[in-house]
Image (cartoon, rainbow, N blue to C red):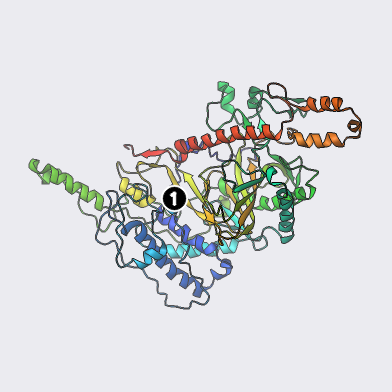
């Protein structure tokens, strides 16, 4: 197991194999995702009558989205031209019109979040009503130049066959006891029945206790416009490198490790040992979130070894027990996520960028300069440009779906070991005066210091808010290993949706709905972003409450609350006030005792006040916000300029 190596979201740029996915495959996954969100989908997908209806509805959805992204706007230089945009339907021989059992899928069709947020496209209703007379879109519409988010060609019978065979397989491997199922996003799993009702009730009770504080003591997340209420957050009372105390497990003594000592105790920072310094935006020299150590038995029973940062272990004993039990259920999700991350994933459709024009039925001979003569150079250039714009890459249909072979699957267990998990609880609170949450930004969790490999989120309580989605996207390395013909920016845009002229090196993987009761787990190599949502009834308040777990790489060990004592000064003050030996001390002597716990003039020491912790959090947040910006610039949104091959 020591040979296992999980991919690192901060160095994904240097991977050698960019995981490009065709827009055709994206469409197949997106359509499958609409089914997976339906009640009892795992049974309905085996009903031929319902499947026939869904197949027809998929064709309608596809036609609308092709119109939305390809034919309902003026042709731009990067769009292939042609008179036959409205291609023949590859209709099934499905004549069943029974609508009793099949739930319509027209509404809420998944479109990439960038397009949704920028309002670059048209709604399904608009597209359907304008289908006969396509609206001409402005050339300055906000779809990124050269990027596409849906295939140009119609969904085929072979693609639909693949989708439903894939769904039937997902239904067959779905865990009926826990409700754990794969989503249409690679390596992402979910369940609506993972947490028993009594655990949810206990969590709600614990949350109410955390929420029941005076208004002036509520911790509204900085910059959230009083919408995000932090109940437990790792940025508060974080580990302060060079300031916080650490317990030496061999001697039992407490000491303050220097930056050099902190870095050298980390075997996952090898370059520091070579250079003696950190030269990376993704590694902090100032802060680290503190995980809690949890033991996981062979039976999957979870127990905390140490305290959860910002949750008093004596005052919230029942909530500790509840969190342990819920975390034990998330272990089942994470084992599937980690196994998928370690296992090779083959694309459903393999393409050859050097020959994808060979089978284009519109293909004509390339213009030759000698056919135009010296006096008609411009005519030749115009003809060559027209010929280039007219070409379309032909994306083959997928072969029939076959389940992955068991010998290709890498198994990974979190049982019978100690895992490190960072815990977070937060509420998003909306009011009639503050009725809409704008959504989040693209990011991965933590920095290199935390080594987070997977996230688990339990959406345990939602009231009077619209559905929200969590979107995912992946980086495409630095583009150097990407296969393409020289200057074939039209091919990349049409086949993959990539802009080869200064476009971002990423692909969106889609999004999942985050309704009440859902447990969701995903790898930290995917960036994720919360979409906007708002009040259903704008005259009443609403909320969405989440419990989050961030799993540290189980093959690594970082500083945790096992060796870092609590830093909350109020915890110590309450205990010293309760100590019988201290109660009888004169005030002056009592203050001398408590002063001993405070940090020295350089800020080194065991405890800090809430005000000091919030100031430290401010610095941490600024550092991490800058790290996200840099990571996007260098990795997830690095500009792609097609180089010569």
| Residue carrying label 1 | 114
The residue at 45%/78% (across/down) is: 97
The residue at 90%/28% (across/down) is: 585
461 vs 114, left or right, is right
517 vs 371, left or right, is right
The residue at 51%/53% (across/down) is: 532
In this orientation, which residue lies closer to the viewer: 124 or 266? 124
Residue 107 placed where, x, y %? 47, 65
376 vs 429, left or right, is left
> Looking at the picture, does residue 166 appear above or below residue 528?
below
Q: Residues within 10 Å of mark 1 (few under 14, many from 20)?
A: some
Which image quadrant: the C terminus? top left
Residue 574 placed where, x, y %? 81, 37
Give the quarter of the image for residue 640: top left
Residue 10 placed where, x, y %? 53, 37
Give the quarter of the image for residue 556: top right
Residue 293 placed where, x, y %? 72, 40
In this orientation, which residue lies closer to the viewer: 107 or 190? 107
> Looking at the picture, does residue 530 appear above or below residue 631?
below
**Element at badge 1?**
helix
Which image quadrant: the N terminus? top right
Count of marks, rendered view: 1
């Amino acid at each position: 197991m020591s040979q296992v190596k999980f991919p690192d979201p901060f160095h994904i740029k240097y991977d050698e194999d960019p995981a490009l996915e065709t827009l055709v495959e994206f469409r197949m996954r997106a359509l499958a995702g609409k089914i997976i969100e339906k009640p009892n989908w795992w049974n309905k997908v085996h009903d031929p009558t319902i499947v026939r209806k869904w197949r027809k509805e998929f064709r309608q959805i596809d036609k609308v989205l092709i119109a939305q992204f390809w034919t309902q706007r003026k042709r731009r230089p990067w769009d292939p031209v042609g008179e036959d945009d409205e291609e023949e339907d590859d209709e099934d021989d499905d004549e069943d019109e029974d609508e009793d059992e099949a739930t319509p899928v027209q509404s809420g069709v998944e479109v990439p979040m960038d397009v949704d947020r920028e309002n670059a496209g048209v709604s399904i209703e608009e597209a359907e009503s304008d289908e006969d007379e396509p609206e001409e879109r402005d050339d300055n519409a906000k779809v990124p130049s050269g990027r596409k988010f849906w295939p140009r060609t119609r969904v085929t019978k072979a693609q639909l066959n693949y989708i439903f065979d894939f769904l039937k397989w997902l239904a067959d491997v779905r865990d009926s006891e826990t409700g754990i199922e794969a989503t249409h996003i690679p390596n992402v799993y979910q369940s609506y029945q993972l947490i028993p009702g009594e655990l949810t009730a206990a969590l709600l009770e614990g949350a109410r206790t955390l929420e029941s504080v005076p208004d002036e003591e509520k911790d509204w997340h900085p910059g959230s416009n009083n919408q995000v209420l932090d109940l437990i957050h790792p940025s508060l009372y974080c580990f302060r490198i060079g300031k916080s105390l650490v317990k030496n497990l061999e001697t039992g003594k407490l000491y303050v490790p220097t930056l050099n000592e902190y870095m050298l105790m980390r075997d996952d920072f090898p370059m520091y040992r070579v250079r003696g310094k950190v030269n990376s935006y993704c590694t902090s020299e100032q802060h680290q979130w503190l995980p809690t150590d949890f033991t996981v038995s062979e039976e999957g029973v979870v127990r905390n070894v140490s305290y959860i940062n910002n949750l008093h272990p004596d005052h919230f004993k029942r909530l500790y027990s509840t969190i342990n039990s819920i975390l034990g259920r998330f272990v089942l999700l994470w084992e599937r996520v980690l196994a998928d991350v370690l296992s090779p994933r083959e694309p459903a459709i393999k393409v050859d960028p050097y020959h994808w024009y060979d089978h284009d039925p519109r293909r004509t001979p390339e213009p030759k300069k000698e056919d135009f003569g010296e006096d008609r150079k411009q005519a030749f250039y115009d003809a060559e440009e027209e010929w280039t714009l007219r070409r379309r890459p032909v994306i083959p249909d997928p072969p029939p779906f076959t389940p992955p072979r068991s010998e290709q699957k890498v198994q990974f267990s979190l049982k019978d070991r100690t895992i490190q998990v960072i815990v977070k609880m937060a509420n998003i609170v909306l009011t009639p005066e503050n009725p809409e949450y704008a959504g989040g930004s693209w990011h991965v969790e933590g920095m290199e210091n935390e080594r987070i490999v997977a996230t688990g989120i339990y959406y345990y309580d939602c009231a009077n808010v619209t559905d929200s989605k969590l979107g995912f996207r992946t980086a495409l390395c630095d583009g150097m290993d990407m296969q393409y013909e020289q200057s074939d920016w039209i091919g990349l845009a049409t086949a993959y949706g990539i802009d080869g002229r200064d476009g971002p090196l990423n692909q969106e993987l889609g999004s999942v709905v985050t309704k009440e009761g859902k447990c969701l787990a995903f790898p930290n190599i995917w960036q994720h972003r919360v979409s906007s949502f708002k009040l259903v009834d704008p005259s009443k308040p609403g909320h969405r409450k989440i419990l989050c777990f961030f799993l540290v790489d189980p093959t690594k060990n970082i500083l945790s609350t096992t060796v870092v004592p609590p830093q909350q000064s109020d915890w110590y003050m309450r205990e010293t006030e309760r100590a019988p030996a201290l109660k009888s001390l004169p005030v002056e002597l009592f203050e001398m005792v408590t002063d001993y716990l405070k940090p020295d003039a350089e800020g080194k020491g065991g405890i800090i006040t809430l005000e000091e912790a919030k100031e430290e959090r401010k610095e941490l947040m600024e550092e991490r916000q800058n790290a996200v910006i840099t990571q996007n610039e260098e990795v997830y949104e690095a500009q792609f300029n097609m180089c010569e091959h």
